[in-house]
Image (cartoon, grey):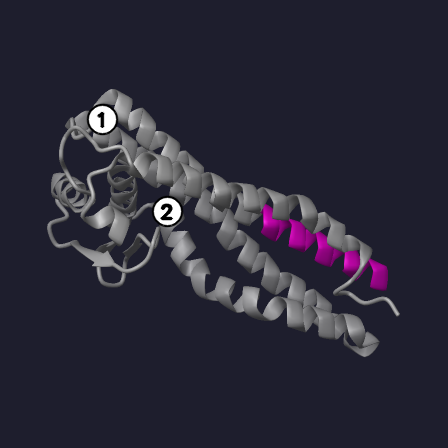
Amino acid sequence: MFLPFLDPTMVLLIPALFFAFWAQSKVKSTYRKYSRIRSASGLTGSDVARRILNLNGLQDVKVEPVPGELSDHYDPRTHTVRLSEGIYGRGSIAALGIAAHEVGHAVQHANGYTALKLRHLLLTPANFGSTLSFPIFFIGFIFSSMDFLMDLGIYLFIGALAFQLITLPVEFDASRRALATLRSSGMMADVEVDQARRVLSAAAWTYVAAATMALSHLIRLLLLRSIRD
């Protein structure tokens, strides 16, 4: 019996899996390297976040610590930049770059950055699609009388893929804003900004890998759908 969970189309996922493993390894090794190098400014991640927020007139945005490693994020619901333990109170190159990146999202939010607004709109459909698309698709695959469920599963997964794709310009733009502000404000020397760029570039590969994986899954679903035709 042909099983959709163990079929030849699974090979499509292998390159994407290797890419994802490489991206995770890259970001962790780069983060570890530059978390050991202190910035000459003596500023911490929370200092940099607060200064950039103030430069952009965002005094109402809070900066708070959050548990975990690389759990940094901006919460648009509460207007809060949350920095992980290794970023909030540390003065490393990695800490300053990541803190500035997260503030970049706060600035995007304040400026009504179109891609960020679109990502927020896609968040709920993407979560719904990533959770239910595969079960719905494979129920339709197994039961020939329910072919329409395969199409529904594909459409749901396209929503999840759209979220991954729109995330790319959002993240790239936040890093661009971060590096430009760190350089223009003088909070980091040029050589340090270049080092921070390596940290943020490594992190960006994880988003590219996630989008690649999602695209590989979609191609697989389309191939399986064509087999049933």
Gap in angstroms between the C-alphas marked 1 and 2 = 25 Å
In the image, which is nearer the foreground, mark 1 or mark 2?
1
Segment tinted magenta in the rendering = 212-228
Question: Please, is residue 217 above or below residue 148 in the view?
Answer: above
- Residue 213, numbered label: none
- Residue type at the position of mark 2: Thr
Q: Is residue 216 magenta?
A: yes
Q: Is residue 148 left or right of residue 16?
A: right
Kindly state the secondary structure of the residue where label 1 is placed. helix
User: Residue at (22%, 32%) from the top-left corner?
Assistant: 181
The quadrant holding residue 154 is bottom right
Q: Is residue 155 left or right of residue 71?
A: right
Report the magenta stretch's main SS.
Answer: helix
Q: Earlier in the sequence, mark 1 or mark 2?
A: 2
Pointer 1 residue: 183
Instruction: Answer yes or no: is residue 223 visible.
Output: yes
Q: Nearer the viewer, residue 80 or 90?
A: 90
Question: Please, is residue 229 above or below residue 181 in the view?
Answer: below
User: Residue at (27%, 63%) from the top-left corner?
Assistant: 77
Q: Is residue 190 magenta?
A: no
Q: Nearer the viewer, residue 27 or 111?
A: 27
User: Residue at (60%, 61%) from the top-left corner?
Assistant: 157
User: Residue at (32%, 58%) from the top-left corner?
Assistant: 68
As drawn, which residue projects farthest toward the top?
190
**Percent position of residue 216, x then y:** 66, 50
**Percent position of residue 54, x then y:** 11, 43
Pointer 2 residue: 114
Question: Please, is residue 219 above or below residue 178 in the view?
Answer: below
Q: Tell me the quarter of the image containing the C terminus.
A: bottom right
Q: Is residue 22 left or right of residue 223?
A: left
- Residue type at the position of mark 1: Arg
**Percent position of residue 113, x then y:** 33, 45
